[in-house]
Image (spheres, rainbow, N blue to C red):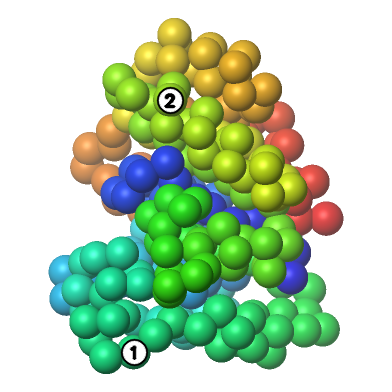
Amino acid sequence: MRGLFITGTDTNVGKTVVAAAVLHRYREHVPLRYWKPIQTGTEQGDDTRDVRWLGMCGESEILDAGIRLPRPLSPHLSARLNGTRIELQALMEIAASEASGRELRWLVEGAGGVLVPINETEFIADLMKQLGVPILVIARSALGTINHTLMTLETLRRRDLLVAGVIIAGEKNSANREAIENFGNVEVLGELPPISPLTPESLRAWAQTELDPQGLLLKCFE
């Protein structure tokens, strides 16, 4: 599998919107496909559906397969309350069957952050390790983001996971961006402001002008 794993410093930080934006930004350069291996809270929402709409995706650009759980909780707890257990091997079998022998580049969206548990012993970080693709971190711009982002970066690097960069979501905060870049030794590849109304067209306009203007993420798709 080649591509990116999109994670966040928290839940509801903007991973899904950024995934759709990356599709707008790079689909003309490489064949991209989005995958959400674990989705909780299906009673309230569906990230795959949102990416399909916001990213103006064709069916070949979406893989809608994996763990789907109704309660909006941590995957391990949502699975337990649903009478099941998430098995990392089952997810890897999906990845292997879909990625083998294909020229696709993948955008894999995680559930919550890096250390969200998926069962009693494994975390989202273990799924990242198995997939072996670089990690794009989505962070908030607001107060507290420096600590949360630096902890996320440190956790990824301690596990020998390659960090592709950071996207900051929210009102622009130049001081927080500078601190994240300097202390985190990382590139901030874009600042996603609140977009109102958030539509496929408005997101595409932002992505084509503001997301990764130097094209650094292309290296992750090679």
Check residue 130 in the rendering and tell me which mark sits there, or answer none. none
The spot of residue 143 in percent (x, y) is: 30, 20
149 vs 12, left or right, is right
Q: Is residue 148 visible?
A: yes
> Which residue is under mark 1?
84
The spot of residue 222 in percent (x, y) is: 83, 55
What residue is at 68 percent from the left and 68 percent from the top?
Answer: 131
Q: Is residue 10 above or below residue 141?
A: below
What residue is at 39 percent from the left and 85 percent from the top?
Answer: 85
- Indicate the amino acid at tag 1: Thr
Name, please, the residue furthest toward the front.
121
> Which residue is under mark 2?
147
Tag 2, which secondary structure? helix
The spot of residue 144 in percent (x, y) is: 33, 24
Q: Quadrant location of the N terminus?
A: bottom right
Name, please, the residue furthest toward the top.
175
